[in-house]
Amino acid sequence: MDWLGPEEWQAVALSLRVSLWATLASLPLGIFTAYALARWRFPGHGLINGLVHLPLILPPVVTGYLLLLTFGTRGPVGSALQDIGIVLAFRWTGAALAAAVMAFPLMVRAIRLSIEAVDPRLEQAAATLGASRLWVFATVTLPMILPGIIAGAILAFAKAMGEFGATITFVSNIPGQTRTVPSAIYAFLQVPGGEDAAMRLVLVSVAVAMTALLLSEVIARKIAAWVSGT
């Protein structure tokens, strides 16, 4: 328990909180988006697909600045939210939003691949028996893509844990409020003698990332086994 100091534990706890909420809050939208991109063809399909994956291409600082312009207290969405008592900029909730935006493409990608692996004829067969589209999804599609959903959520959680550029641009680096593990590592490296604390947090980050990747790989293999029927 003494391996990490109080400030380091605080950063780890905040990162876990931010990552958990970022993953849970974006999961329903991630499932819907993945299903729409995998199964529907509509005007603007390519544009939506590009926007979903844009955070992977843009520098994280640019994403964070766009979030600040939109959700800051002077932004169009942020000012409206402030009127009802919700402030995201320079709050841990804003860190969760930034982490969710950066992790969203990985989540959608994993879920979309699992949906595309499901034979559409199974869904069509259920529909011919009179089942509604929502019921078909709940009883046929969802059970088959559940491993993909879990894999996407794990990857999103790991990405959220490591998010730095967008987070520090949008919510700054406030100890106890917005200082996540990556921000804490950066802060420790700026002061003399902080290298040991930074290294401990680096090890925590590596352990979390490796665990998430291993879990994701195991689940991906299960998906392949289920699809092949072995």
Image (cartoon, rainbow, N blue to C red):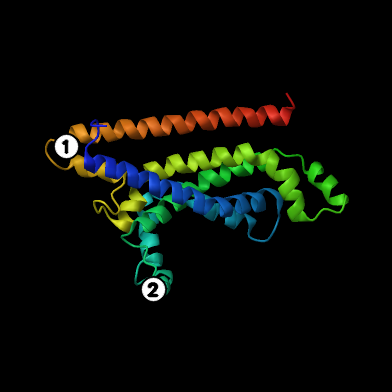
Residue sitting at x 30%, y 33%: 202
Give how far across and how far down residue 2 sits, in percent. Answer: 23, 31
Q: Earlier in the sequence, mark 1 or mark 2?
A: 2
Give how far across and how far down residue 15 sits, in percent. Answer: 36, 45
Query: Relative to 227, is 24 on the left or the right?
Result: left
Total marks shown come to: 2
Kind of residue at disc 1: Gly
Residue 194, numbered circle: 1
Query: Relative to 14, is 184 on the left or the right?
Result: left
Which residue, as the protein is rendered here, is positioned at the far right?
A: 129
Give how far across and how far down residue 76 sits, in percent. Answer: 42, 72
| Mark 2, residue position | 79
Give how far across and how far down residue 115 sits, in percent. Answer: 67, 43
Query: Relative to 19, is 203 on the left or the right?
Result: left
Nearer to me, 177 or 57: 177
Disc 1 packing (10 Å; few <14; some 14–19; many ≥20): some
Classify 74 as above or below 104: below
What secondary structure is found at the residue carrying circle 1? loop
Residue 116 seen in render: no
